[in-house]
Amino acid sequence: MDAFYRIAERRIIEAMQNGDFDNLENMGKPIRFEDETWIPEDLRMAYKFLKNAGCIPPELEMRNEMVNLFSLMNTIDDDKERLKKIRELNFRLLKLNMSRNKPLTFEDFPEYESKLMDKLTANNK
C-alpha cells in the first residue's frame, strides 16, 4: 500500500509542476466538505446517490422544516400561536431524535437551547 501512495504522490507533484491543476473549476475557493455525521454510516452511500439525483433525505428535510419553523416562531406576536409552534417544534425535535442513532444536539438552535435550559433550571428551584 505504501508503494501505491508514493506513486500517487509523485504523479500529483508532477501534475502540479506541469500546471495540470492550474485551470480547474473552483480553483482558489475553499473545498466545501459535506457534514454527513447526521447520516447513519450504512445509509451514507444511498443518501449520496439521492442527493446527486436531487432528492433530500427525510432527516434533512425535517431539519430544514425545523429551522424554518424556528424562524417563524420568532416572528409571531400572538402567545397562543407561538405556543402552538413551540409544541410543533418540540414534536419535530422528538421525532428527528427518535429516527437518529445518536442524540440530537441543539447547535443549530442556540436561542432555543438557552430558553429550554432556563425553563428546566427554573423548575428545579
Image (tube, rainbow, N blue to C red):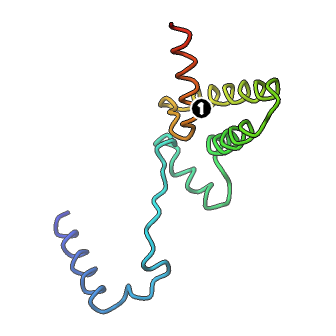
Query: Residue 28 appears at what percent x and percent y?
Result: 42, 78
Query: Residue 102 appears at what percent x and percent y?
Result: 47, 31
Q: Is residue 37 left or right of residue 46?
A: left
Tell me where residue 66 sits by quadrant: top right
* Total residue callouts: 1
Residue at horizontal 30 percent and vertical 92 percent from the top? 18
Query: Residue 67 appears at what percent x and percent y?
Result: 66, 42
Residue at the far bottom in the pictured view:
18
Q: Work out whether 92 lies above or below 33.
A: above
Q: Secondary structure at mark 1?
A: helix
Tell me where residue 58 sits by quadrant: top right
Residue at horizontal 49 percent and vertical 31 percent from the top? 101
Image quadrant in which the N terminus is located? bottom left
Residue at horizontal 39 percent and vertical 88 percent from the top? 22
Q: Is residue 13 left or right of residue 90?
A: left
Of residues 93 and 108, the one nearer the viewer is: 108
Q: What residue is pinned by disc 1? A: 112
Residue at horizontal 22 percent and vertical 68 percent from the top? 5
Q: Is residue 50 left or right of residue 82?
A: left
Of residues 52 and 69, the one nearer the viewer is: 69
* Mark 1 residue type: Tyr
Q: Work out whether 67 lies above or below 99.
A: below
- How many C-alpha atoms fall within 10 Å of the one at disc 1: few (<14), some, or many (≥20)? some
Q: Is residue 70 left or right of residue 98?
A: right
Q: Work out whether 102 lies above or below 34.
A: above
Query: Residue 17 appears at what percent x and percent y?
Result: 26, 89
Of residues 106 and 25, the one nearer the viewer is: 106
Of residues 23 and 119, the one nearer the viewer is: 119
